[in-house]
Amino acid sequence: MIIFNYETDFKLQKEDSYTDWINQVIVSEGFMCGDINYIFCNDDYLHEINVKYLNHDTLTDIISFDYTEGRIISGDIFLSVERVKDNALDFDVSFNLELLRVMVHGVLHYCGYEDKSEEDEKLMRAKENEKIRMFHVEQ
């Protein structure tokens, strides 16, 4: 089950579309969906988690805690809406596109993709792009 939590004024529109998409992404990688919590927050909220749990005194757009067991994907994905907005400006893309990228990034980590090396990062970006193309929202 995918649950969206909000620790900020931001709220996804058409949550069901995002739920369907994340489920499709997980199945397309040969996994099943367990419990995934998306927590949308601001920079201060995510910075506190980064310091407290990861001992990193930096801002970040996403922190994910992986509880996957076998082929069942589960975890908590914290997203800073402020970082996503800033990244969208920096990368000259829409907020919605950058949001999709960050949302799927956490799930792809749960599927075993890494981004520590240059080669791994290229594969992660390719997978992000592939999965973003799977997202469809009726206008």
Image: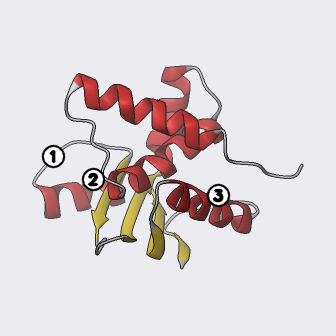
Report x, y in % for residue 131: 57, 43
Apparent side of residue 16 relative to residue 120 in the rendered image (left or right): right
Vertical relation: 90 (above or below) 94: above
Amino acid identity at mark 2:
His
Q: What mark, if any, has residue 57 been given in the picture? A: 1
Q: Please identify, in this view, whether the residue under mark 3 or under mark 2 is nearer the observer.
A: 3
Which residue occupies 65% across, 31% down? Answer: 94
Q: Secondary structure at mark 1?
A: loop
Q: Please identify, in this view, whether the residue under mark 1 or under mark 3 is nearer the observer.
A: 3
Which residue occupies 54% across, 79% down? Answer: 1
Q: Dot 1, how many residues are within 10 Å of its Cα: few (below 14), some (14-19), or many (20+)? A: few
Estimate the spatial distance between the alpha carbons at disc 1 and disc 3, rounded to whole Å. 33 Å
Estimate the spatial distance between the alpha carbons at disc 3 and disc 2, rounded to whole Å. 28 Å
The image quarter containing residue 68 is bottom left
Report x, y in % for residue 11: 65, 62
Return the residue nearer the eye: 31 or 9: 31
Whether pointer 3 and pointer 2 mark residues with C-beta atoms closer than 8 Å, the reply is: no
Write down the residue under mark 2.
Answer: 47
Amino acid identity at mark 3:
Trp
Name of the residue lying farthest toward the front: 30
Write down the residue under mark 3.
Answer: 21
Q: Secondary structure at mark 2?
A: helix
Whether pointer 1 and pointer 2 mark residues with C-beta atoms closer than 8 Å, the reply is: yes
Mark 1 vs mark 3: which is more N-terminal? 3
Vertical relation: 55 (above or below) 119: below
Amino acid identity at mark 1:
Asp
Estimate the spatial distance between the alpha carbons at disc 1 and disc 2, rounded to whole Å. 7 Å
